[in-house]
């Protein structure tokens, strides 16, 4: 199970990205209506006295928040696929088991958690403010660094150690 879990996490990442795309296809108005409702509760925006300026700000924020939902989808499916490919390369490496295990977990956990910075910014950004929401959930953003470090370990193992496909066995 220790070796399978990173693969399960990577596949779960892709499934989450596809699942939200299915939800978009079923009824994207659910997301857009939530964004509009939450923006009407944003005190900073509602304090804008000029009605035209307020409506322009609301329109901008609606578009940005909707884009964050889409970014969750794009990042989850893309990073999930990259994670899966990287894990396959790691599994074919003759690098020490501990290096492969640590790198695999860094790739899969970082890849799974990173897209959530965009999902949580989309969910909470309309009420809190986009910047504030990204800051509040920045831990998930840092998981992109964990993912990158795992990829660096993979690169190191490819350079340093032979590959099962290249060995003479």
Image (cartoon, grey):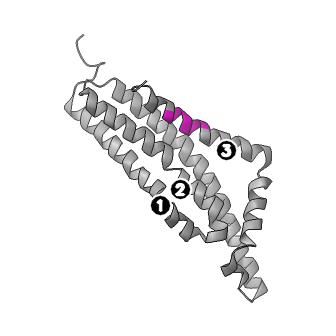
Outermost residue, top side: 169
Q: Position of residue 159 (x, y in %)?
A: 23, 34
Quadrant, the C terminus: top left
Q: Quadrant location of residue 64?
A: bottom right
Quadrant, the N terminus: top left
Which mark is in front, 1 or 3? 1
Tag 2, which secondary structure?
helix
Gap in Å between the C-alphas at discs 3 and 2? 15 Å
**What residue lies at 79% left-to-right and 43% top-to-bottom?**
26
Residue 22 vertical placement versus 84 (above, below): below
Residue span colored magenta: 9-15
Q: Position of residue 86 (x, y in %)?
A: 40, 34
Q: Position of residue 46 (x, y in %)?
A: 73, 81
* Residue under pointer 1: 138
First reached walking from the N terminus: tag 3 or tag 2: 3
First reached walking from the N terminus: tag 1 or tag 3: 3
Cβ–Cβ under 8 Å for marks 1 and 2? yes
Residue 32 vertical placement versus 10 (above, below): below
Q: Position of residue 51 (x, y in %)?
A: 78, 85
Q: Is residue 138 left or right of residue 58?
A: left
**What residue lies at 33% left-to-right and 37% top-to-bottom?**
103
Tag 1, which secondary structure?
helix
Magenta span: helix, strand or loop, mainly?
Answer: helix
Q: Quadrant location of residue 53?
A: bottom right
* Residue under pointer 2: 117
Q: Is residue 75 left or right of residue 147?
A: right
**What residue lies at 74% left-to-right and 89% top-to-bottom?**
49
**What residue lies at 60% left-to-right and 36% top-to-bottom?**
15
Outermost residue, front side: 1
First reached walking from the N terminus: tag 1 or tag 2: 2
Is 46 in front, or is 161? 46
* Residue under pointer 3: 20
């Amino acid at each position: 199970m220790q070796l399978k879990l990173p693969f399960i996490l990577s596949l779960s990442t892709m499934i989450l990205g596809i699942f939200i795309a299915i939800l978009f296809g079923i009824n994207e108005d659910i997301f857009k209506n939530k964004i509009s409702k939450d923006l009407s509760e944003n005190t900073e925006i509602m304090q804008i006295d000029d009605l035209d300026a307020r409506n322009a700000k609301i329109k901008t924020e609606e578009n940005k928040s909707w884009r964050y939902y889409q970014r969750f989808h794009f990042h989850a499916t893309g990073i999930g696929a990259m994670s899966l490919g990287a894990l396959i390369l790691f599994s074919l490496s003759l690098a020490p088991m501990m290096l492969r295990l640590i790198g695999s977990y860094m790739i899969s956990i970082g890849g799974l958690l990173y897209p959530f910075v965009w999902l949580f910014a989309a969910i909470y950004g309309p009420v809190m403010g986009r910047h504030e929401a990204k800051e509040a959930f920045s831990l998930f953003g840092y998981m992109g660094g964990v993912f990158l470090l795992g990829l660096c370990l993979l690169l190191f193992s490819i350079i340093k150690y032979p590959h099962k496909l290249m060995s003479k066995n």
